[in-house]
Image (tube, rainbow, N blue to C red):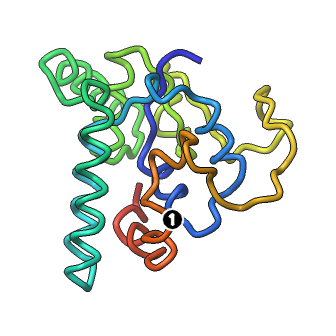
């Protein structure tokens, strides 16, 4: 798989107390260096953080966001001139086709198209119409050629795994599983 842009819904899934094993397996099969995130994902997360009821939960999630930014470095993709031009094309194409495409997903689509990335998401309908390669780890086995293997016995990410690198530390996530739920419902 070429470089992979992880959509917000995948990050949200990894923060659940028992993330869907196929999502965890698909992320673990990636080299961390091949993972990309859009700044748009961080905007979505920040929007959700501000709605968290307790300040300590806000600090915890913002601390995790800073750590992910540090780990990803140049693999955290912003909106540059080329991306904004592609975004305009995506919006125009969606409007002509009468597709309802959320702005944040259209920006993520433009980012993926600009950098020729595969998007890992469950929202395939927001990306596939624009000739963007999509990988849906929630797909049924007959709908994908990806070999997930067998369901593991453990329901959590193993320390040092790629999915663990993208998750809040277990002790924090276990005490606050709802911390990312509210902020990414729309993603």
Q: Quadrant of residue 181?
A: bottom left
**Left or right: 177 in relation to 153:** left
Q: Position of residue 115 (x, y in %)?
A: 35, 16
Q: Position of residue 21 (x, y in %)?
A: 71, 52
Q: Position of residue 18 (x, y in %)?
A: 64, 66
| Residue 147 visible, this angle | yes
**Image point 63% across, 47% down: which residue?**
24
- The residue furthest left is 81
**Image point 57% across, 29% down: which residue?**
30
Q: Which one is in front, 102 or 111?
A: 111
**Image point 83% across, 39% down: which residue?**
141
Rendered position, 166 above or below 64: above
**Image point 65% across, 37% down: which residue?**
26
- The residue beneath circle 1 is 170
**What secondary structure is marked by label 1?**
helix
Q: Quadrant of residue 99?
A: top left
Q: Position of residue 6 (x, y in %)?
A: 45, 38
**Left or right: 69 in relation to 37:** left
For the N terminus, the quadrant is top right
| Residue 129 visible, this angle | no
For the C terminus, the quadrant is bottom left
**Left or right: 146 in relation to 186:** right
């Amino acid at each position: 798989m070429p470089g992979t842009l992880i959509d917000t819904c995948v990050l949200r899934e990894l923060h659940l107390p028992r993330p869907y094993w196929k999502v965890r397996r698909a992320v673990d099969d990636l080299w961390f260096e091949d993972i990309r995130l859009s700044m748009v994902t961080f905007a979505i997360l920040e929007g959700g953080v501000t709605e968290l009821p307790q300040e300590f939960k806000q600090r915890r999630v913002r601390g995790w966001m800073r750590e992910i930014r540090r780990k990803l470095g140049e693999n955290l993709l912003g909106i540059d001139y080329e991306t904004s031009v592609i975004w305009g094309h995506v919006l125009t194409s969606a409007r002509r086709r009468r597709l309802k495409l959320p702005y944040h997903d259209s920006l993520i689509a433009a980012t993926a198209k600009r950098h020729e990335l595969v998007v890992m998401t469950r929202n395939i309908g927001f990306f596939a119409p624009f000739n963007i390669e999509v990988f849906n780890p929630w797909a049924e086995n007959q709908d994908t050629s990806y070999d997930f293997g067998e369901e593991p016995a453990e329901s959590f990410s193993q320390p040092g795994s790629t999915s663990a690198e993208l998750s809040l530390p277990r002790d924090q996530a276990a005490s606050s599983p709802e911390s990312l739920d509210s902020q990414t419902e729309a993603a």
